[in-house]
Image (tube, grey):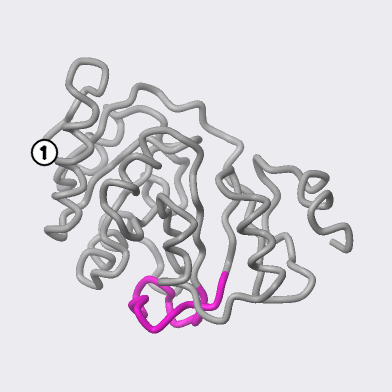
Amino acid sequence: MRIIDLKKEDPEKATLEAARALREGKLVAYPAESFYAIGADAMNEDAVRAVFAAKKRDPGKPLPVIVGDTGLIGRFAAGISEGAGKAVKELFPGPVTLIFHASGEAPSALTAGTGKIAIRVPLPGVASRLALAFGGAVTATSANISGLPGLTDPEGVAAWFPNIFMVLDGGVTPGPPVSTILDTTVSPPRIVREGALSKDAIRRVFPEI
């Protein structure tokens, strides 16, 4: 396992190295806004299955992803409605995950056969830089064994997931709240989980919610 301390090593070089590892089908742990996350190339079915195996996650539960730029959403989401487009424009980047109908590019393992994909465009930070460097969709599931709390420190990630190829050590993450989840496949959009982005903030965009 390669552990890169982003305070001691060149962050840009480390990010490019991590993006290269993702392209090779390897798993990379990185600090997200709340917990560490396990990243894989979300369009690589074998890599996605490796994430499920590492987390001991129920294959019936889809994995969320991050992208570095809203312009990439159309590659992974299909039939984006007017409401979904409004959500993208008004709520991204930010601590909210939007559910879309998945495009044909998304592997069934990622969507767990739901036909939907959950996408987030994170605020500037390690996660957004990694997604931008990778240039595609990166899995953004918390680094934890399913059913256990998410991990906020890189040492815990390394201990629990010894088979991960690389850990981007960004220090301790703050923990909850996690991102809010908004389903844009229905009209009006529906809040699936309220988290860091409040219901009031969403109502300023969608008063009908």
Which residue in the protein does label 1 denote? 1
Q: Is residue 61 left or right of residue 170?
A: right
Residue 109, quarter of picture: bottom left
Residue depicted at 74% across the width and 66% down the height:
190
Q: Position of residue 198 (x, y in %)?
A: 75, 43
Does the stretch in magenta take in 194?
Answer: no
Indicate the position of residue 145 as horizontal and vertical percent values.
37, 49
Residue at x 52%, y 31% (from the top left corner): 175
Tell which of 45 and 125 is nearer to you. 125
Which stretch is magenta?
A: 100-116
Callout 1, which amino acid?
A: Met
- In the image, 85 versus 150, the foreground residue is 85
Is 106 part of what is drawn in magenta?
yes
In terms of depth relative to the viewer, which is nearer, 87 or 65? Answer: 87
Q: Name the quadrant of the C terminus.
A: bottom right
Image quarter of the N terminus = top left
Q: Residue at x 39, y 84 (%)?
A: 104
* Callout 1: SS: loop
Image location of residue 141, percent across then percent down: 41, 52
Residue 153 location (% of width, % of height): 36, 27
Dividing the picture into quadrants, the one containing residue 113 is: bottom left
